[in-house]
């Protein structure tokens, strides 16, 4: 069992930046591909970014490419999602997810076994 914890959400003005972190309680994420998803009010949860368990590949949704950066520390303790040039439409609950399966890319919700509780990001105009 992997217990994921997100942090770093909050209220930000449009045009600003925010960093979200994902970690696993009591263990590292070295064996897991980690993805970030978001769910805006009234919308489906959507994929935004993922980093392969090896760290060798990164994938971004086309809708956010260029404004998001996913990274992980060398010890695979934390996976960070940085969002730049925030827009009101980025307002959502952001979830990190992890899975040990080696398939790639991994953009669909059902491809991730473990999920965090989510962290709210609100962008004011």
Image (cartoon, rainbow, N blue to C red):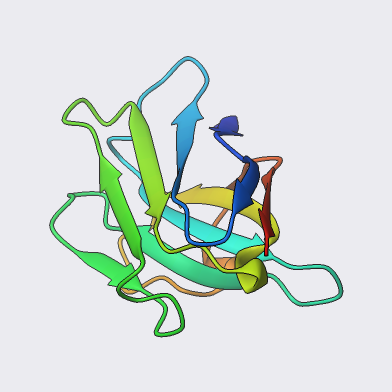
- Residue 107 vs residue 46, the one in the foreground: 46
Question: Image quarter for residue 59?
Answer: bottom left
Residue at point 36% right, 67% down? 67
Q: Where is residue 97 in the image (x, y as percent from the top left)?
A: 53, 50
Q: Residue visible at 31% across and 57% down?
A: 69
Q: Residue 50: x, y in percent?
A: 37, 61
From the viewer's perspective, is residue 69 above or below residue 67?
A: above
Q: In the image as oriented, which residue stretches furthest toward the bottom?
A: 62
Most foreground residue, 15 or 50: 15
Horizontally, residue 40 falls left or right of residue 16, namely: right
Give how far across and how far down residue 36 sits, in percent. 49, 57
Image quarter for residue 66? Answer: bottom left
User: From the viewer's perspective, is residue 87 above or below residue 124?
Assistant: below
The image quadrant where one finds the C terminus is bottom right
- Image quarter where the N terminus lies is top right
The percent coordinates of residue 124 (x first, y second) are: 69, 58
Q: How many labels does the image show?
A: 0
Q: Choose between 37 and 27: the one closer to the eye.
A: 37
- Residue at 57% from the left image edge and 68% from the top image edge: 87
Q: Can residue 104 be seen in this view?
A: no
């Amino acid at each position: 069992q992997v217990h994921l914890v997100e942090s770093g959400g909050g209220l930000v003005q449009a045009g600003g930046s925010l960093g979200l972190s994902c970690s696993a309680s009591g263990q590292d994420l070295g064996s897991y591909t980690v993805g970030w998803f978001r769910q805006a009010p009234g919308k489906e949860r959507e994929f935004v970014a993922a980093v392969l368990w090896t760290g060798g590949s990164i994938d971004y949704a086309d809708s956010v490419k260029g404004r998001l950066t996913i990274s992980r520390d060398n010890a695979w303790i934390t996976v960070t999602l940085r969002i730049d040039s925030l827009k009101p439409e980025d307002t959502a609950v952001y979830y990190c997810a992890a899975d040990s399966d080696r398939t790639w890319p991994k953009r669909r919700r059902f491809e991730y076994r473990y999920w965090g509780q989510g962290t709210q990001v609100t962008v004011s105009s």
